[in-house]
Amino acid sequence: MKLFLSLLFRNRLAGFGAVVLGIVVLAVLATPFLPLPDPNATDTAQKFLRPGTAGHLLGTDHLGRDLLSRLLWGTRLSLAVGVAAAVMAALGGSAVGLIAGYVGGRTDNIIMRGVDMLMAFPYILLALAIVAALGPGLLNALIAVAVVNIPFFARNIRGIVVGLAHREFVEAARLSGMSHIRIMLSEILPNVVPVIVIAMSTTVGWMILETAGLSFLGLGSQPPTADLGSMLGEARAALITAPHTALVPGAMIFLIVMSINLLGDGVRDALDPRLRSGALSRPMAAALVRRNGPVPEASDDLLALQDLHTEFHAGKRVLRAVSGVSLAVKPGECLGVIGESGSGKSVTALSVMGLVASPPGVITGGAARFKGQDMIGADFETLRRLRGDRIAYIFQDPLATLHPLYKVGRQMAEAIQVHHQIGNAEARARALDLFRQVRIPNPESRLDSYPHELSGGMRQRVGIAMALANDPDVIIADEPTTALDVTVQAQILSLLDDLRRERGLAIVFITHDFGVVAQLCDRVAVMYAGRIVEEGPTMAVLEAPAHPYTRRLIACVPELGGGRRELAAIPGLPPAVDALPPGCAFAPRCDKAQEACRAGDIALEGASPRRVRCIFPEEAIA
Amino acid sequence: MGRYILRRLISAIPVLLGITVIVFAIMSLIPGDPATAILGAYATPENVARINRDLGLDQPAIQRYFIWLGNMLTGEFGRSYSLNRPVLDEILDRFGATLILAGTAFVLCAVLGVLAGVISASRQYGWADKAITFAVIIGISIPSFFLGMLMILIFAVRLKWLPVSGMYAIYGGGGLGDLLTHLIMPAFALAVVATGVVAWLSRGAMLEVLRQDYIRTARAKGVPERRVLMGHALRAAMVSIIPVLGLQAGFVLSGAVYIETVFQWPGIGRMLVDAILKRDLLLVQGGVVFVAAIYVLFNIAVDVAQSMLDPRIKT
């Protein structure tokens, strides 16, 4: 709703711009037909009349000329000159860009070098040089402003033409014997016209401003003709005694430029699908919490998720990423959470510490308790103190999750220093020690490396070392080995396993790979469409999967030396979580599905720890 | 780093040469006899003969270019006929004033713009964001020369807080305090548009960065939010903000031409406008080349700053 209001606010501004611009354009078009005094008729007896004087609505200037009349005629001239400059720049720039992009090779190189040179000037210097050479005057100012803006168009258009020049339809035209000029005009030009128009609409405001500026300096329109700029320039002499002569044209330039800017912005935003989907929102420090149901009672687990619900609100769509997940770990225990992409396993993990991107994420129910304390309702400072200190994360893809501009040693030290008051040297020593623990070779020199200088395996070790920095009680590892090759993956897994045994660390291990689960986890929970469909001790689940989905998932794992077993992909895709079918979400892909499966909610049944959410389980569970 | 700076300086040579070629080409557009055009009202036969000799104006264009280039490289920018003094002396005298004005405005736009962008992004859709957005819309739409006049009306004429114009008071002026009171209005008027642009692009850059995974990592580590914003996020956003600042330097230099005219600031921008109105073409030519060269060097400094900030750029 907030997002919607903001979009409306924006659109209202764009609408305001359109209305103002429309009024100005209409007034200017009607000017020759309005009963206005001659804008150049001087009457020095009537000079500097204040606005509101009878017969002179906006007053008169230093020569007693009617300001309203001069304003409208001046606006007319300014708009015409600005638009003309924009058209000239667009034509010239597009021609240059079209030729450079189409011909390519040396021609392109030389032309674009020239364009770069032109762009090396602060724009007004070039305009001033041109006006200096051609002499002051409105036409020369127009030429100067147009020329100065040619590089901008040339660059934009060339970029697009280069992409088009070798497309099939152009090749076909060439093979059919069309001349180059015809190909450029009839095949390529129509494809770049929209870009030219957009570029024009974004620059026309500037051009009006720039030509007005040159006139203001006395280099544009010459007396007695006046555009808005020269009106303002002439008013400067009497600024203190008759400020209205300056305010009138100045406010008009401001209105025109602002309405063009607003309109252009609004149109661009409206065309940008990212804005509508809310993808341009920044995530807040902690996920939004809007709990609907009661908060579940505390349990005696180290970490317990209780009936957790997390949703994503994108416009009117509500994606139920996690609906009613309960999980728990004890010290020294490793719990695997497994499922396909989109099953909600990562969102579950991120919800624990309020790290779900929000907006659009909202935690709508349940609790996440650490040693009995609920973290979902907790204030931010409590949450922050636990983050990375008692509960640490290891993320997938450490190239994206490590800060690219900080040395890894510094990122390590920071992880410690935000929770412990220690000096830099001590933090560095501790970081070095952690690097040794995760078996990073040459740890000393690695501390001063940037993430992009390390290999994928090394980066992942840095991620693990960082998670271990404060000797946490729980580590939540979100697919930490997915991006790595098999041997590195095995090393990392055994490293985590050792740490768990040595430190009594509890691990929640999120993966889509049953092979990894078998290696590391005591227990496993299988997720599908935001819910747990089966859970139990790892061996029990692996040997006798009860849910059809689990069985199919296990069948996806190739077994070394397992003979010529057929790898069975699961047909179909996981359902979209904004349109979940009633009953079992897996039913549409399940070959055993029956009427009852689609009827209504199916409970997670069985005695803890072994439970399944299926009416027709593959195996009877005790 | 030293080698990188050197390499960038060497790569600027063709750009600087290109600038001289372009300026020379534009000046060749002057219709009619160049000597008469350059001298304008001062075209006495002696002066014409002298300038033809000095600049080789009777020679073909290519030779004329090299004579001009050679002269400039030896610090000989020619003589201003309207001021009757060497062009380079006049430029150097004026440049200090422009540097003070444009430099102050640039620092203002960089600091205020980035700050506003950070605040706006961290309070996205909140009232602070809306207020800043509103200010940005006004700021980038108001012509700086009109804004300057408004400021004079309000702060100098109505409130009498600040002097109307000039760089120092005419009677008993001088000193830093006097300079500062004269500097405040023109510097702000000059900075406003650039501040708006910087704020807007900084906001976008921050929003982009705040969605990145490494920001989530920082938060997962328990880094305090202020430090996430002003440290992790801003540092990364600066990589895309710095090139924008480089561009803004060009806009600030351009805007200085207007602001110096409005506030009677004795800088190089006003010198150029006066020179054009007096048809003192050698002064225009020299001033344009000089300022463009400074701008190129400034952009090298921007590139160097960028490479110091981002270790991924190969130096």
Image (cartoon, coloured by chain):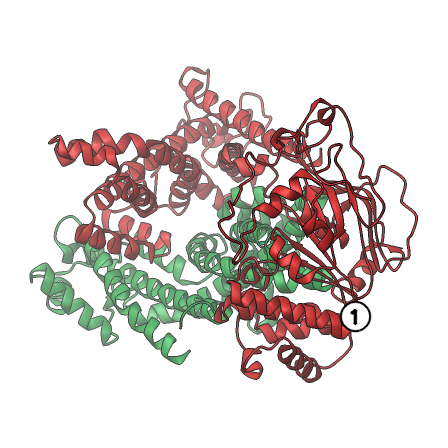
Chain colours: A red, B green
The residue carrying pointer 1 sits among few (fewer than 14), some (14 to 19) or many (20 or more) residues within 10 Å by Cα, namely some
Q: Position of residue A333 (x, y in %)?
A: 78, 62
Give SS at disc 1: loop
Q: Amino acid at mark 1?
A: Gly
Pick whichever, A157 or A245, lies toward us: A157
Which residue sits at x=28%, y=52%? A115
Pick whichever, A407 or A328, lies toward us: A328
The image quadrant where one finds the C terminus of chain B is bottom left
Q: Position of residue A136 (x, y in %)?
A: 29, 45
Res B170 seen here: no
Would residue B228 be found to the left or right of residue A85 on screen? Answer: right
For this orientation, the residue located farthest to the left is B59
Pick whichever, B66 or A553, lies toward us: A553
Which residue sits at x=66%, y=38%? A548
Would residue A85 be found to the left or right of residue B304 on screen? Answer: left
Res A8 seen here: yes
Query: Is A394 situated above or below A531?
Result: below
Q: Position of residue A609 (x, y in %)?
A: 82, 50
Q: Quadrant of residue A593?
A: top right
Location of mark 1 (residue): A504
Query: Is A193 situated above or below B247?
Result: above
Which residue sits at x=55%, y=53%? B205
Q: Position of residue A412 (x, y in %)?
A: 65, 73
Q: Quadrant of residue A615?
A: top right
